[in-house]
Structure formats: C-alpha cells, structure tokens
Image (cartoon, rainbow, N blue to C red):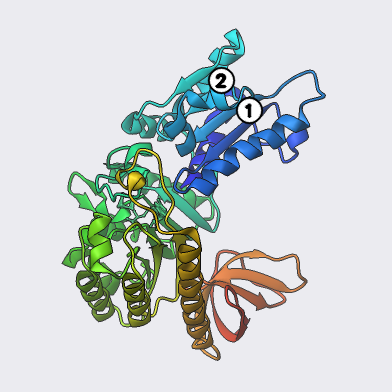
Amino acid sequence: MNEYDSNRIADLLQSIDLKRVDDEQLADYFIFNTCHIREKATQKVYSDIGKIKKIFRDKRSKPTFILAGCVAQAESSVVFEKSDFVDIVVGPQAYHKLPGIIQEHNQNREKICNTDLDVSEKFDTLNSYKNNFSKVSSFVTIQEGCDKFCKFCVVPYTRGPEFSRSADTIIKEVQNLVDYGTREVVLLGQNVSAYQHEDFNLAKLIKQIATIAKLERIRFTTSHPNDFDEELINIFKSEPKLMPQLHLPVQSGSNKILELMNRKHTREFYLDLISKFKSARSDIEFSSDFIVGYPGETEEDFEQTISLVEEVQFSNSYSFIYSQRPGTPAVDLDQISKPVAQKRLEKLQQVLFDLQLKSNASKINQKTKVLIENMTSTANQFFGRNEYMQPVFINANNCIIGNVIDVSIHSYKRNNLFGTII
Ligand code: SAH
Ligand code: SF4
C-alpha cells in the first residue's frame, strides 16, 4: 500500500510543479513514506534520514525533508525531537494535504505536523487526480484501516478505522488504468475482505470490475479469515478473471495463541475455510503470514503452527518474529527469549521454503499462463507472472507486453520459474 500511496503523492505534487528525480543529489524535496508494522522498519527510517543528512552536510541549501506514512502517524511531532533534519510530518490519511502544506512551509519555513485521520477527505481529493502509474499490473487501494484490534498490531492506530471507497470511484480508477495499459489489478486494503460500501461488498465489486473488457486478471490482498461468507468464497468459482491464489494470514496454528492474539478465529475454523475455497476452486493455492515467539508461545504451540503449515501446504508465505509495538495491548506481556524465537523462525522458514520448492517442482513441464510485464536486461528474456503470482522468466525473441501467453516451465529456483513459450 505504501507503493500505491507514494505514487499517489507523486500525482498530487505535480499540481505544484514538483516531479520525481532519480538522482538524490538533485532533489530539493525528500519524502520518506514509512512503515511501522515491525520495529526494524521503524529503526531504519532514522538511520536512512541520517544518510540523506550526510549528503547535504556540506551544501548550503538543505532540502525540504518530509516524513510520511505510519511512522509519521505513530511518532507525530516527536519526530522533530528525534531528527532536526525533518521539516514536515504527515500521516497516511493526511498526505492529500501535502501540496498546501509544502506551499505553507515554503512561505514561513516553520515545521508542520499533520496526522489527521481524514481518510474520506483523502479519497475525495485523490479521486480528482489521475492515477499516472498504470503498469501491466497495478495496485488500487479500495479499503483502509482496521477495526479488529489484534493485540500485536499497530494498524488500527496508524491507519485508523475501517474505511471503504465507493465502488464508482474504484471502477473509474481501474478503467483509467486499463485505458493506459493495465491488464491486472491488485485490490488493496489492510482488511480488503471487509470491503463494504453501500450495496457493494468485495464479491460484488470484483464482479463489476471484471466487466472491464481489457482487464485480464484481478487479485486482492490482504484478507482476514473472519470476513469470508459463501458469496466471497464462491466468487473464486464463478469469476474466471479472479486468480486462484489467496493470501490468507493465519499468524499461528495454536488456538491458545490465536486467542491471546485476539484473532477471533480458531485453527479448525481456518482449516475449514481452506477446504471451502478448495471446493470452490480445486486449483487454488494459499500463502500466509506467521508470527513466531508471541508472548506465551510454548514449544507445543509452535509445533501446532508447523502442523498447520504442513496440513495446508502453503505455496509461499511471510514469517516474522513477534515485534513489540508501542501502544498495542501485547507490548507489556512477558517476552519469549530472542534465541528461542529465532530458532523457531528458522525452523518454520525451512518448512515453508521446502513447501515452496515442492510447489515449484510440481509446475515442471506443466502449462502455465503468464501475463508479460517487461523485457529483462538479459538478451531475449521476458518477465511475467503466472496465475499464482510467481515470477516467470521466459526465453523468447519477441513477446507482447500486456499479453497472456502459454508457457511451459522447464526449471525453477525458490522464488522464480523459468520457461519457454508453447
Ligand atoms: N490484516 C492482515 C494483516 C496486516 S499486517 C491480517 O489480519 O492478517 C501484515 C502482517 O504483519 C501481519 O499478518 C502479521 O503477520 C505481521 N505483523 C503485524 N504486527 C506484527 C508484530 N507486532 N510483530 C510481528 N509481525 C507483525
Ligand atoms: Fe492488524 Fe490485520 Fe489484526 Fe487488523 S486484522 S489488527 S490489520 S493483523
């Protein structure tokens, strides 16, 4: 979502004649769009600000430095105490105000902090600016925020309560992207499966978007298991443009830990949901997010996570050691020791990587449909993604960017498949 937001910031700033430059030495303005989900990402922000500060130490004119995103939201004006290099702090629901904020700063050079949670106003503003980042596969935010309050997570505090954009404005944005070359759209939200605007839920929105003629593929991320009803499960059966891959974070395979996390679903509920998706579409594959070393996690709880992974056979996943986030309910709980958590993460990742390799191996000599995104820097090689969003490298003299072609896979690495045109 930060990638989408960054591109929208670039769209907005064209209105005050600012444009992107590739060379940081040439920049008069810097904007860091930041993530607060884990501590590592947050720490990196300040060391990266230090690097920019160094570049400009010997120059007379200091660039204007803007800290945007969820670190800005969480730390607010404290950012100015931590780094005097920062001029403007703007949260993820206030960045639409940047053109005015920058002009104000240029006039009086005073520091400005805006962390309003005006998500509806933000989209009202963004809707009148063209989304200029039409790629073969483009992101479109349809929903933001979260009302679920898992005990480890900062999202409800940094992105604010759940908000869904109107179907009408989303469809216009997708249509515009398609007119400029998009063939796949990835619908984004922190809880995209909770999308609801007037009569439109996510299933109805997908059906409507699928009527856009030149759009070939639809995906959505990230979902919460509790949001799926029959209609949203069956859309995988009835809508061929919806790709058979679902990212469905589970976090843990232990009911005790799920309860401590306030996930409000059980292991059994999750496994039952997986089998419902498989009944709707037998070739569907799943990916997930896992947190290891959550306070209270015993070796037995962890083994429950491993057994869930083996039962579902995820084809690709993200896993993290629990990270204490300020302001969340879990922050004060007794922590699992770092070496124990690290050992568990390594074990889980080994199991996940083996499953990924197994899934890749099953695609050898199989036909897969690849949406071509670009040429690579290697001669006669093109890049695209198959139905499961796996990167595929294809040897070919010529491919049309934006076309879906049949490819036979001949080899693989953990993250990539290699094939030839059939
Ligand atoms: N809404 C989605 C997840 C959004 S956050 C869901 O409910 O599943 C993206 C991922 O970051 C989460 O799935 C979780 O695995 C990870 N995450 C969030 N907070 C974390 C924390 N405090 N420590 C470690 N990982 C965390
Ligand atoms: Fe965070 Fe997802 Fe839980 Fe919301 S549902 S609090 S975004 S992990």
Residue visible at 69% across and 24% down?
Answer: 63
Q: Quadrant of residue 238?
A: bottom left
Left or right, 198 with reference to 155: left
Q: Position of residue 407 (x, y in %)?
A: 56, 82
Query: SS for tag 1?
Result: loop
Question: Could you tell me the amino acid type at mark 2?
Answer: Ile
Q: Quadrant of residue 402?
A: bottom right
Against 398, is 19 above or below?
Answer: above
Q: Position of residue 419 (x, y in %)?
A: 62, 82
Residue visible at 56% across and 42% down?
Answer: 43
Name the residue tied to disc 2. 102
Q: Position of residue 82 (x, y in %)?
A: 57, 27
Image-quarter location of ligand 1: bottom left
Mark linked to residue 18? 1
* Residue furthest to the right: 58
Q: Is residue 3 visible?
A: no
Residue visible at 24% across and 80% down?
Answer: 279
Question: Could you tell me the amino acid type at mark 1?
Answer: Leu
Q: Nearer the viewer, mark 2 or mark 1?
A: 2
Mark 2 residue crowding within 10 angstroms, few (<14) / some (14–19) / many (20+): some
